[in-house]
Image (cartoon, rainbow, N blue to C red):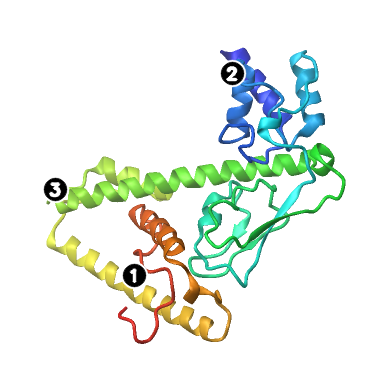
Amino acid sequence: MTDVKTLADRIEDLLPQTQCTKCGYPACRPYAEAVASGAAHYNQCPPGGAEGIARLAALLGKPVLPLNSANGVERARPLAVIDEQVCIGCTLCMQACPVDAIVGAPKQMHTVVAELCTGCDLCVPPCPVDCIAMLPVTGEATGWDAWSQGQADAARERHHRHETRLARERDAAEARAAARRAGSAGAAVSPASVAAAASAEGGAATPAAPVTATAADAEAKKRAIIQAALERARKKKEEMTATGQGPLNTENVSADVQAQIDAAEARRHRLGLGTAPGNGKPPKPSEPR
């Protein structure tokens, strides 16, 4: 088992770390482990191209094979570009990016940090308004000629931080949900659940007292503060939209697209990662808030 793990490490070091899933695995590391165990072939990585296959073949002591066409083709490295005039700020592309290369906020225009984009294409399918284009930026250079070891190492580190952050957010959301369930049942919050929540949030854990009226008052005050902050944010968004600084086509979103956005916001709300689900558009003055 140790030998397989060591081999997986060495295979992973030879992969371009685009995290594109074209190999048929959710990221570069699972693919490396599959190749090391013999569950996958070493010619399934389009971003690595012919040179990547040659590197893996040399490591494994096997013949060089052509890239498996079922996994894609070797090509110039693309860069994701968002048409900000069409973007509706749904955040679906941000959630799909495996290296956190997209910057934005709900109902605000998004943009891609070019230096961080690996050209994985994963942000394109979830975009409900088809506002993301993948533009080749390396000319005739393909595979490893269009990429560098330094870029691969940086992308691997960003992906690791991305996965660590998602795990931390999931743990925190689960701990908050457990605390809410315990509170709604009138039960005391156990020190263990408080420690789990604090650990997930990166803070210090302190024993919790049983849920009391004082705790309920504190929770109500907290919600009032949050609601006030949301109201300020809503007004700020309206001001930005009025001056043309927000998404410009939110009034023309189809019902199908809006359903996708509402579903995404509902998931974020359930996980405690966002505001309550709404209609995904800045409300009109005549609409109830």
Q: Position of residue 57 (x, y in %)?
A: 77, 19
Q: Amino acid at mark 1?
A: Ile
Residue with the most extreme right position: 140
**Where the C terminus falls, by quadrant?**
bottom left
In 3D space, how far apart are the residues under numbered discs 3 and 2 (Cα atoms)? 48 Å
Q: Which quadrant holds residue 66? A: top right
Q: Which label lies toward us, 3 or 2? A: 2
Q: Are marks 3 and 2 in contact (CB under 8 Å)?
A: no
Q: Going by the image, does 132 lie left or right of 274?
A: right
Q: Which label lies toward us, 2 or 1? A: 2
Tell me the element at label 1: helix
Which callout, 3 or 2, points at the residue further toward the start of the chain?
A: 2
Which callout, 2 or 1, points at the residue further toward the start of the chain?
A: 2
**Residue 207 visible in image:** no
Q: Amino acid at mark 3?
A: Ala
Q: Going by the image, does 112 lie left or right of 141?
A: left
Q: Are marks 2 and 1 in contact (CB under 8 Å)?
A: no
In 3D space, how far apart are the residues under numbered discs 2 and 1 (Cα atoms)? 50 Å
Q: Position of residue 142 (x, y in %)?
A: 82, 41
Q: Position of residue 117 (x, y in %)?
A: 68, 51
Residue identifier under label 1: 226
Tell me the element at label 3: loop
Residue identifier under label 3: 187
Tell me the element at label 2: loop
Q: Residues within 10 Å of mark 1 (few under 14, many from 20)?
A: few
Q: Residues within 10 Å of mark 3 (few under 14, many from 20)?
A: some
**Going 74% across and 16% down the picture, which residue do you hit?**
60
Q: Which mark is residue 276?
A: none
Residue identifier under label 2: 39
* Residue nearest the observer in this picture, 174 or 66: 66
**Going 80% across and 20% down the picture, which residue do you hit?**
64
Q: Amino acid at mark 2?
A: Ala
